[in-house]
Image (tube, grey):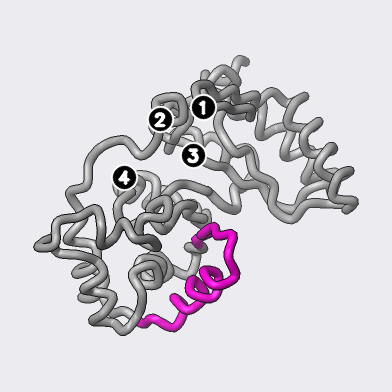
């Protein structure tokens, strides 16, 4: 996948998938990669073609498990029929909830783990925006965080962590201090009522989560052509 601020180019051909994997092995200096993702879906290539090559790489011992990122329900099901998908990476946070209707139930059905990226709402739940960009009389997640004796970022991560043992969020940070704060979310214990209370105030968030070019590369637009016979 190649990208800039205006365009995203995705290549899912078998030849490119293999060349990328073998180049990664060489750069890393390892014999195999534990979990290898197709990070976006090439909507011009049948997913069976891409998965067929990744399956060969598994059989050759070059990768152990296959993951997809931002794949649609149809693409997930078709890919899984070629070779089991171990993990699906998607954006999921308190205010990015669309995957809960169709994608999550499918992954539960197929036994696919979920790896949510941007679980802090692209930094919103960990920064000053929580208190500075919303009217003072709004029902803030920070107030709920105070109730649970933690920071807003920890509450947002705890909410994700409590969605299931097969859900492993990947918050990003460049600071050790924030890493320690994120790890502290594991100590926040929530019950079913807590989870509902936390999610309910921002359940009506609307609007796209990124630019048009990147929206076109999300699971909503990730169906691929049928496999030619």
Sequence-earlier tag: 1 or 2: 1
Question: Quick check: marks 3 and 4 in contact, CB under 8 Å?
Answer: no
Question: Which numbered circle lies on residue 98?
Answer: 4
Tell me the residue that label 3 is attached to.
70
Helix, strand or loop at disc 3? loop
Question: Which numbered circle lies on residue 211?
Answer: 2
Question: Quick check: marks 1 and 2 in contact, CB under 8 Å?
Answer: yes
Quadrant where the C terminus is found in the figure? top right
Of tags 2 and 3, the one toward the viewer is 2
Of tags 2 and 4, the one toward the viewer is 2
Q: Please report the bounds of the magenta region as a residue range.
A: 169-189
Sequence-earlier tag: 3 or 1: 1
Answer few, some or many: residues within 10 Å of disc 3's Cα (few below 14, many 20 plus, some between 14 and 19). Answer: many
Q: Is residue 30 visible?
A: yes
Let me know if residue 174 is in the magenta part: yes
Going by the image, does 77 lie left or right of 9?
Answer: left
Is residue 63 positioned above or below 18 on the image?
below
Helix, strand or loop at disc 1? loop
Residue 28, percent from left and from top: 84, 50
Answer few, some or many: residues within 10 Å of disc 4's Cα (few below 14, many 20 plus, some between 14 and 19). Answer: few
Sequence-earlier tag: 4 or 1: 1
Helix, strand or loop at disc 2? loop
Let me know if residue 97 is in the magenta part: no
Of tags 3 and 1, the one toward the viewer is 1
Answer few, some or many: residues within 10 Å of disc 2's Cα (few below 14, many 20 plus, some between 14 and 19). Answer: few
Question: Quick check: marks 2 and 3 in contact, CB under 8 Å?
Answer: no
Of tags 1 and 2, the one toward the viewer is 1
Is residue 190 positioned above or below 166 on the image?
below
Going by the image, does 136 lie left or right of 73?
Answer: left
């Amino acid at each position: 996948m190649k990208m800039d601020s205006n365009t995203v180019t995705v290549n899912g051909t078998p030849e490119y998938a293999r060349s990328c994997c073998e180049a990664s092995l060489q750069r890393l200096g390892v014999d195999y990669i534990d979990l290898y993702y197709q990070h976006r879906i090439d909507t011009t290539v049948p997913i069976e073609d891409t998965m067929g090559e990744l399956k060969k790489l598994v059989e050759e011992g070059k990768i152990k498990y296959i993951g997809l990122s931002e794949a649609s329900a149809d693409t997930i099901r078709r890919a899984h029929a070629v070779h089991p998908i171990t993990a699906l990476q998607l954006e999921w946070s308190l205010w990015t909830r669309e995957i809960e209707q169709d994608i999550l139930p499918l992954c539960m059905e197929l036994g696919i783990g979920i790896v949510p990226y941007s679980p802090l709402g692209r930094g919103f739940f960990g920064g000053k925006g929580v208190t500075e960009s919303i009217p003072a009389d709004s029902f803030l997640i920070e107030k709920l965080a105070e109730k649970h004796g933690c920071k807003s970022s920890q509450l947002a991560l705890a909410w994700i962590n409590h969605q299931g043992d097969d859900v492993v969020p990947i918050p990003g940070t460049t600071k050790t201090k924030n890493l320690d704060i994120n790890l502290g979310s594991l100590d926040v214990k929530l019950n079913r009522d807590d989870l509902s209370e936390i999610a309910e105030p921002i359940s009506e968030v609307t609007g796209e989560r990124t630019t048009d070019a990147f929206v076109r590369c999300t699971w909503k637009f990730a169906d691929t052509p049928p496999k030619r016979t």
